[in-house]
Amino acid sequence: MVDDEPIPETKLTSTKRRWAADGKFLTGRIARPGADRLPPGQHLVKDWPVLDLGQQPHISLENWRLDVTGAVENAVSVDWAAFQSMPQSESLSDIHCVTTWSRYDNRWQGVATRDLLDRVMPKPEAEYVMLTSFDGYSTNLPLADFAAEDAILATTWEGAPIIRSHGGPMRLVVPHLYFWKSAKWLTRIDFRSRDAAGFWEKNGYHMHGDPWREERYSGD
Ligand SMILES: Nc1nc2c(c(=O)[nH]1)N[C@H]1C(S)=C(S)[C@@H](COP(=O)(O)O)O[C@H]1N2
Ligand SMILES: [Mo]
């Protein structure tokens, strides 16, 4: 199982764990999406930083797979061709990273999470999803957030295939939560009745991660 492999400690993981312990970047202000496009404590960037655990997996389209497991009526394991034959959508959204950068107007194409949900049919007890990626990363979020109208299993950004460093061939984008919830190189979506912590959530980060409420760290 990919999520059982230990992830090596790096300067990034130790620094970010320390920020969580210190409550770094918290302003104590509350804002609202719409009224305040830029969440509290964030600043705008024009470039697009790369953030990950330092291991960017090479996944050929032949070896790519998405497994949907757990509390669903129709568990599926789809290959790239089957994924491409699912309904395709476009979503324009902003990125908010917990390290305080935000990037406006990112145009994504791929499979809307709602179309995936229509296909797999979560059972009534399914309230959370655990996401697992090809690099061993994991992150958790409530099903209600995963199901957001603009959440997308994205394969293109600005009209071109997402490059490997940004999570290609496919990454999740859940724009209304901090970007660490948007798993790059996603390969498994597990539906659960109970919440469990993913990688950053085990390292001091919030189980929900709403930028407008500054849900950065587990104590917030
Ligand atoms: N598989 C995987 N997904 C991941 C991460 C990771 O390390 N591995 N890092 C997360 C974090 S902390 C952020 S801010 C965003 C960064 O995405 P980007 O590199 O495309 O900006 O990816 C998220 N998804
Ligand atoms: Mo992040």
Image: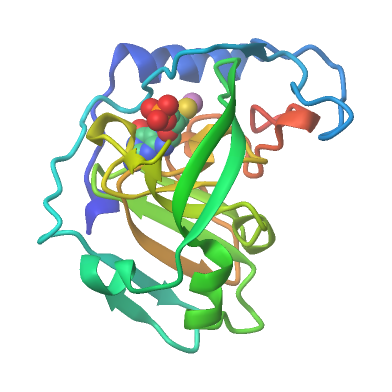
The residue shown at (55%, 11%) is 45
Q: Quadrant of ligand 1?
A: top left
The reply, left or right, for residue 158 in relation to residue 134 is right
Residue closer to the observer: 40 or 142: 40
* Residue 1 x, y percent position in the rendering: 22, 59
Q: Is residue 29 above or below residue 143?
A: above
Q: Is residue 40 above or below residue 125?
A: above
* Residue 29 x, y percent position in the rendering: 86, 17
- Quadrant in which residue 62 is drawn: bottom left
* Residue 134 x, y percent position in the rendering: 24, 48
The residue shown at (39%, 74%) is 69
* Residue 184 x, y percent position in the rendering: 36, 42
Residue closer to the observer: 66 or 103: 103
Q: Residue 215: tell me if it is visible.
A: yes
The residue shown at (52%, 61%) is 112
Number of marks: 0
| The furthest residue to the front | 159
The quarter of the image holding the C terminus is top right
